[in-house]
Image (spheres, rainbow, N blue to C red):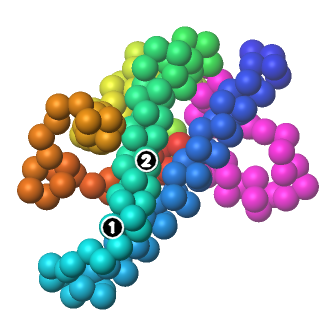
């Protein structure tokens, strides 16, 4: 593989990391509002005095869920990150981390190499070769897709409800809230 292939893959990862970082910042706001409401109301029912502000809070949450679900689907579907890696870049996913970056920081290089090897072992536990095969990437893609299927389904439900498409919300809203755990798992996966 030449350096152009390597830089293409690095650019793909960098774009996805930027998206995850944006989701993380948005989730922080949503959690802060949720924690404040929980603290102030002491988990009791409360009356909404400003319906416009309340709708804005719900719209923020719904937009987050819709965008996060859309991103999750895009990563696993045809043309998405995992399919691109599987089709064109699988040999760039080496077990051993090699990079010219940080050449003057031996400790940092060592830490990054260790983190890379841990991540490779977590994602591809059955791979003993220097790099995974396309089937191994497919296993990761399938696991990723299954793990986040509830969120992607929920995102479609929120989208449908926000456009008044026939969807029946449960007594507890739409039946599921986006969890920080899902985002944390995704950040760990991509690191």
Q: Which residue is at the front of the view, 179 or 137? A: 179
Q: Residue at x 36, y 34 (%)?
A: 144
Residue 58 placement (x, y as % from top left): 35, 58
- For mark 2, what is the residue? 63
Instruction: Measure the C-alpha gap from mark 2 to mark 1.
Output: 18 Å
- 122 magenta-colored: no
In the displayed orientation, state which residue is furthest to the top.
Answer: 87
Q: Position of residue 134 (x, y in %)?
A: 47, 15
- Residue 92 falls within the magenta-colored stretch: yes
Q: Quadrant of the N terminus?
A: top right
**Could you say which quadrant of the image residue 19 lies in?**
top right
In the image, residue 152 sits, relative to residue 62, either above or below, namely: above
Span shown in magenta? 91-117
Could you tell me if residue 152 is visible in this image?
A: no
Label 1 crowd (10 A; few <14 / some 14-19 / many >=20): few
Q: Nearer the viewer, mark 2 or mark 1?
A: 1
The residue where tag 1 is placed is: 51
Residue depicted at 65% across the width and 24% down the height: 92
Q: Residue furthest right?
A: 104
Mark closer to the chain start, 2 or 1:
1
- Compared across the picture, whether 7 is left or right of 31 comes to right
Q: Which of the two residues, 160 or 116, is positioned nearer the viewer here?
A: 160
Where in the figure is residue 118, as x and y percent of width and height?
A: 51, 48
């Amino acid at each position: 593989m030449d350096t152009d292939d390597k830089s293409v893959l690095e650019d793909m990862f960098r774009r996805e990391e930027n998206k995850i970082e944006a989701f993380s910042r948005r989730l922080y706001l949503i959690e802060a509002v949720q924690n404040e409401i929980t603290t102030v109301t002491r988990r009791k029912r409360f009356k909404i005095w400003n319906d416009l502000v309340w709708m804005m809070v719900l719209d923020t949450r719904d937009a987050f869920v819709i965008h996060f679900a859309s991103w999750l689907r895009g990563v696993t579907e045809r043309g998405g990150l995992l399919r691109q890696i599987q089709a064109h870049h699988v040999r760039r996913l080496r077990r051993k981390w090699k990079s010219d970056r940080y050449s003057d920081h031996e400790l940092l290089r060592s830490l990054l190499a260790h983190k890379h090897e841990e991540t490779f072992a977590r994602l591809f536990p059955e791979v003993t070769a220097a790099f995974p095969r396309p089937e191994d990437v497919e296993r990761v893609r399938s696991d990723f897709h299954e793990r986040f299927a509830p969120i992607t389904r929920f995102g479609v439900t929120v989208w449908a409800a926000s456009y008044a498409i026939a969807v029946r919300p449960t007594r507890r809203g739409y039946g599921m809230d986006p969890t920080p755990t899902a985002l944390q798992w995704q950040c760990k996966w991509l690191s």
